[in-house]
Image: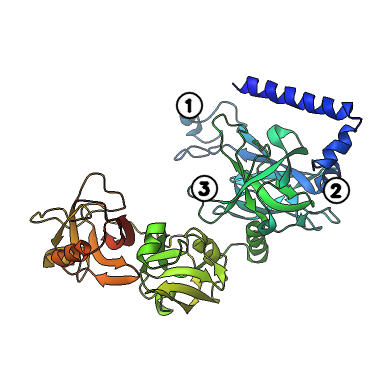
Amino acid sequence: MMQRSRSTLAAATFAALAVVIAAGMPVAAQAQRVGLPDFTELYEKQSPAVVSIDVTQKARAARGIPELSEDDPFYEFFRRFGQIPRDRQAPERQSVGSGFIISNDGYLVTNAHVVDGADEVKVNLADKREFKAKVIGTDKRTDVALLKIEAANLPRVTIGDPEKLKVGEWVVAIGKPFGLENTMTAGIVSAKGRDLPQENLVAYIQTDAAINPGNSGGPLFNLKGEVVGINSLIFSRSGGFMGLAFAIPIDIAMNVANQLKDKGRVTRGRIGVQIQEVSKETAEAFGLPKAGGALVNSVEKGGPAEKGGVEAGDIILRVDGRDVASSVELPRIITAMRPGGKVTLTVWRKGASRELGVTVVELKDDAGAAQQRRSGPAPKEKAKPNRMGLVLSDLTDEQKKEAEVKGGVLIEEVAPGIRGNVQPGDVILAIVNRGQTTEAKTAEQVNGLLSRLDKGASVTLRLKRGEQEFFATLRLNGVE
């Protein structure tokens, strides 16, 4: 299948060239006419600032096995039982990566995973000079590392603006794939703001430029010769390139690099909220004109958001005038803020927007890492499903105490086929519809409220599950 496609492409290309030649038009002129780029000048100017990185990591002794000299009386014991190799020279693990120089005095950037656990890092310049590099600092959350070599008057890259990148724009990677130094590959921007699992602080640039092992940490250039990203990840079933490569936007990387240079570590901001995405149905239930922003599930007690007046059920639309298009954008915006600074949040509450001032505090590594309890309150006497397909019951005093709520209604059962993030044991705290929020007090009250709504209407429930509070939006297409 793949071979046939390549043959078809080759035949089509040959036919096109034949037409051009037959028409008396040079191929180069035709290429220029259709806008195909010439990368030669970019390579000549930018490749001197791209470096190859060789990493050596010595083998570590197994946990619990001491490092003994041959004169130690226990040396022979451990050697005989296979814990100490006969060859006293410890094996080493070699790996390669790429990087680029950001200052004339020898600072350069690469991926954190390239130098992770390194005992020795060597940097090879395009002019064949070799330097031993010092790792100034790494940030695993963004996969950025800052290195330093002792040299002067070095070529350096020009930093671009990834916000100006457009999908479809040509980009170029230079690096050391499979150990092949100063290799250039080209492609286009396939997507921007790509969200990847477990990578919530980086909105990646996706490209189809060929990126392979060894390209990690190398620069992604636009056609102006500006670095717009750091090549960091690929999606592959074979371990090699399959057309899906991802780069860290250079503005994120430079923010990290500057912090590592100035203070040796990275500080991030937080405001103390738990959030979730705003779907079309959720926006409708809250009276929001269109889906967008970040819906606040809960607010940390005594945290900066609570002190600033943020409430559960608010939808954060903007931060200092910058739109929050989706919930994943809010952490990226807030974590980039300097702790101690004040931001203005534009929130949607009860059918209208308002502005709140919140002071950003420092995000600790273990913030929000507390275990969430999954056990919900125990059900009691069963009732019939309501229009939403939920079987509800009133909470007993004991259940309220266990769930740590003053009021609410228990979901005992969820009818098959009901879509939405609801499950037995959840506690309904409130119902949101057309921008109005009603506290859930009894099962009869909630069922009555739902009975008065039109079929197909969107209803958002504020729920509590264990220690977590969140919103779930459903449509009234359940049991009639």
Residue 190 at least partly seen? yes
The crowding category of the residue bearing disc 1, from other C-alpha atoms within 10 Å (few below 14, some 14 to 19, many at least 20), is few
Q: Which mark is residue 45?
A: 2
Up-down relation of residue 242 to residue 335 (above or below): above
Asked if the residue under mark 2 is in contact with the one under mark 3, i.e. CB atoms within 8 Å, the reply is no
Q: Amino acid at mark 2?
A: Lys
Badge 1 is on which residue? Answer: 82
Residue to which mark 3 is pinned: 196
> Identity of the amino acid at label 1?
Gly
First along the sequence among labels 3 and 1: 1
Q: How far apart in space, not on screen, are marks 2 and 1 (Cα)?
A: 54 Å
Would residue 105 appear left or right of 418 to someone viewing this image?
Answer: right
Image coordinates of residue 51 in percent, x first then y, are 76, 45
Is 473 on the left-hand or right-hand side of 355?
Answer: left
Residue 211, percent across and down?
66, 38
Q: Is residue 227 above or below residue 187?
A: below
What residue is drawn where x is 13% and y is 55%? 379
Q: Mark 2 vs mark 1: give the one in front.
A: 2
Between residues 440 and 74, which one lies in front from this camera angle?
Answer: 440
The answer to which quarter of the image holds residue 300 is bottom left
Residue 200 place in picture, x, y as percent: 50, 54
Q: Tell us which disc is closer to us: 3 or 1.
A: 3
